[in-house]
Image: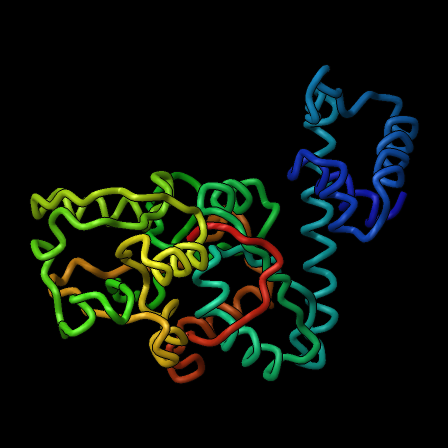
Amino acid sequence: MQIETLKIFCDLVETGSFSLAAERNFVTQSAVSQQVRGLEELFKHRLLERVRGRREVRLTGAGELFYQESRHVLAAYGTLQERVRGLDGTVAGAVRVATVYSIGLHELPHAVRRFMALYPSAKIDLEYSRTTRIVRDVSSGAVELGVIAYPEKRRGPSIIPLPGDRLVLICTPEHPFARRKKLRAADLQGHDFVLFERDIPTRRAIDRIFKAHGVTVRRVVEFDNIETIKRAVEVGFGLAIVPRPSVLDEQRSGQLAVVQLAEPEWTRSVGVIHRSDRTLSTVARKFIELLTDKSQVPGLRSQVKSRDRLGT
């Protein structure tokens, strides 16, 4: 039995998917199945059971025990690797970071490039997801760090605050609001809006602010993707409220007009979350240090290629 086999098993449990476990470990799905069968034969216990009619796997009692102990072995092995590499002062290894699309595309890339320049032996595996899944993946240990908007205090994950963003209104350059330097919430009463879907934290924050100011807008369409929202505004579907870093390029090119919102509460908080009951890897700690150092990451703004189209 090899360390890689334990990692494949843990990835399978944490993702609940043979295909995702295979993708994470650069093997085939059949190889994942073979590794699980090999473990079951070695320990003479069934570790997983499939749920009939669903693409789902569940741990047996023996599987739960095996999973928990495997996590300890993997953590110890990771610590061993770090300590040996650290003998010569090298920061090496990989950290899995999950983030929402707007932050990952428009704010983290500069930080990632700066980090790779500072620590060329380290690697950041950046992936994009919705906030609910990021919290779940951090809690399960599937990813080490999550960078999300409007992080909420809850049992389990710790929160490290990062500089927040101002929310701004966007519209077509021809819209009457485009000539305004600043708008108040009351000015938006009754207008057509392109909105984030209801379960996205930025949408919930916008709804709270509208309610606090007694403002009702007309919901034209909802999307889970900030890029789709921007395109819908461009073609005249309505107005939208988005984080300012996500529309800097469109503002410079003249594709969209960006208008400040007057009230102080139009600010989106951002934070890093991680499990409080686990010691962070050296790579994760160094990445957090860079994110919280304003001199290293001015504005956290740039671009990065996304492999998924997901919400903010």
Residue drawn at (55%, 54%) of the image:
128
Query: Hey, which quadrant is residue 72 in on the image?
Result: top right
Position in image of residue 21 (x %, y %): 74, 43
Quadrant of residue 55 within the rendered picture: top right
**Among the 4 quarters of the image, the one containing residue 43:** top right
Question: Looking at the image, which is closer to me, 16 or 223?
Answer: 223
Viewer-closest of 209 and 76 = 209
| In the depicted structure, whether residue 170 falls above or below residue 109 | above
Q: Is residue 141 left or right of residue 38?
A: left
- Total label count? 0
Q: Residue lying furthest top in this view?
A: 52
14 is higher (above) or lower (below) than 108: above
Image location (x, y in percent) of residue 95: 62, 61
Task: Tell me which colouring the rendered structure shows.
Answer: rainbow
Q: Position of residue 233 (x, y in %)?
A: 34, 59
Does residue 240 appear left or right of residue 72 in this picture?
A: left
- The residue under the point 31% across, 68% down is 244
Q: Residue at x 51, y 51 (%)?
A: 310
Q: Residue at x 37, y 44 (%)?
A: 222
Q: Position of residue 159 (x, y in %)?
A: 38, 54
Above or below, 67 relative to 181: above
Q: Quick one: quadrant of the N terminus?
A: top right
> As drawn, is 182 to the left or to the right of 163?
left
Relative to the observer, which residue lies in front, 233 or 225? 233
